[in-house]
Structures are given as structure tokens and as C-alpha cells.
Image: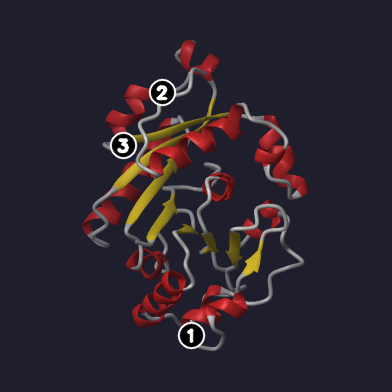
Amino acid sequence: MLKVILVASGKGGTGKTSLTAGVGAALSERGHRVLLIDGDCGLRNLDIVLGMSDRVVYSFADVAGGAVPLADAIAQHPVHQTLHLLTAPVALPALSERGMEQLAVQAEAAGFDHVLIDGPAGLPAELSWLAHIATQAIVVTATDLACIRGAERCARKLEDEYCIQRIRMVLNRVRPRMICRGRSANIDDAMDEAGLPLLGLVPEDEDLIACGNNGTSVLTVKRSGAARAFQNIARRLDGERVALMRL
């Protein structure tokens, strides 16, 4: 059964796009067919992080609007062969719930196991169309209090207005030294404040930043740090019980 996962955040700068790319690549490595959708209309950058800017032509709006079938619109990742991208339009289009439903139907018919939607930061109106087809959500937050408060508000909106029942949190860009010195919320505090179960921890990783800048998958250059965190999250999405990383 197709899993459509909306990756959301209460505010920008949480590393949501890097997480979407990394977890998508990790799911692909596990043998799944994965479709990544950049849902950030006007501010798209998932293609840059994936190193696929020269491969994308059509957007998810072209598919949802019926102009182009999904099979013709998606672009295949150059390294992870079962990973595909559907980019965002440069401007917010007129969308419909029916059109988004048809996109999901085509994704399932094409044999995709997972659709990961890199949603826009915050709570803009277009989030409703993306959330409409989501079967679950991941809320990404850093450990600073402003991000955690935004994560809580985002989660409540996804649950109350968009009726997404399975919502889990990823603590991203975690800096253990700051937590130990009391300069950042710890894991338990973040979970209590956001009111969400924890799906995973991702440490701050300079290699992830470097890979995003040159369009290289971090999973191809290392197996520790953020790469290992993405693999652990992918395993949990597959239903495995995986202990949290020691940071």
C-alpha cells in the first residue's frame, strides 16, 4: 500500500529539505520505489539538494492539473535508481483536491511504495492540498524553543484541520554540546513541548551541508552522522524497532 508522507515544519531553517532527500535516498537503498515531491511553490530547492536541477522539466502542478501524466513528469535520480523527483511550480497554481488525488492514484499505479512531500515551511494555504493526500506526516524541528513551538502548532493544524492522525517528529541539527550545557532544549523537553512521538534524531553534520551544496547524496560519501540517522529513520518507517543514535 502506498505511503504518502508529508514532511512539514513550523518555520524555515529546520533542514526539512535535506531530511526529505536523505530519507528518500535511504528508503531507495532499502529497495523501495520512492517519489519525492517538492511542495514549496516559488521557493523550490529539492532539485538542488539532489543534484537534479538539469533533469526536471514538469512540476507536480502539471500532473495534478492533468496536463502531463506522472510517468512523463518524474525525473530519475542519477545514483539512486529507484528514487524519483517531481518538482514544484515556480508560482502557486490553481490546485484541486481531485487533481492531487489523481496524482496519488498514478503514483500507486506506477508502483511507488513511498511518496515524500517536502512541504512549504510554516502554515501557508497550499499546505492543505498537499496534506489532503498524506497518510502520515513528519514534523521537522531543531532544538531551539522557537522551532519547537512552531512544530507543535504545525502538528495541531495537520491533526485538527487536515485529519492526519499519524504525526511524528524528527529533531534535526542536534548539537549535543549545547544540550549538555543547557543552552538548548533536550530531547525529552522537545517531545513534551511539541506533544509528538519521536521518529528520529539527526546530528548537525557539516558533510550534509557540503553535499547539499554540490548536489551529492550524503549516503554515497559516509555511513555515520546524518547519513546513519537517515538510514535509521527509513528503517523505522519500514516498521523496524531501532534504538536512538548515541550523539
Task: Identify the residue shown where x is 52% and y is 37%.
Answer: 231
Contact between marks 1 and 3 (CB within 8 A): the answer is: no
Q: Quadrant of the N terminus?
A: bottom left
In this picture, is 100 found above or below 230? Answer: below
Nearer-the-camera pick, 76 or 10: 76
Counting from the top left corner in percent of width and height, residue 227 is at 60, 34
Task: Identify the residue shown where x is 59% and y is 58%.
Answer: 82
| Labels 1, 2: front one | 1
Q: Which residue is the extreme one toward the top?
A: 181
In this picture, is 211 found above or below 104? Answer: above
The CA span between labels 1 and 3 is: 36 Å
Q: Residues within 10 Å of mark 2 (few under 14, many from 20)?
A: some
Residue 206 - label: none
N-terminal of the pair, mark 3 or mark 2, is 2
Nearer-the-camera pick, 215 or 82: 82
Contact between marks 3 and 2 (CB within 8 A): the answer is: no
Q: Secondary structure at mark 1?
A: loop
In this picture, is 32 found above or below 195? Answer: below
Q: Secondary structure at mark 3?
A: helix
Q: Identify the amino acid type marked 2.
A: Ala
N-terminal of the pair, mark 1 or mark 3, is 1
Please indicate whether residue 141 sits to the left or right of residue 18 in the image: left
Counting from the top left corner in percent of width and height, residue 84 is at 60, 62
Query: Label 2, on which residue?
Result: 185
Q: Identify the amino acid type marked 1.
A: Gly
Query: Label 1, on which residue?
Result: 65
Please indicate whether residue 20 sits to the left or right of residue 219 in the image: left
Q: Identify the amino acid type marked 3.
A: Ala
In this picture, is 218 found above or below 87? Answer: above
The CA span between labels 3 and 2 is: 12 Å
Task: Identify the residue shown where x is 41% and y is 56%.
Answer: 6
Query: Label 3, on which residue?
Result: 194
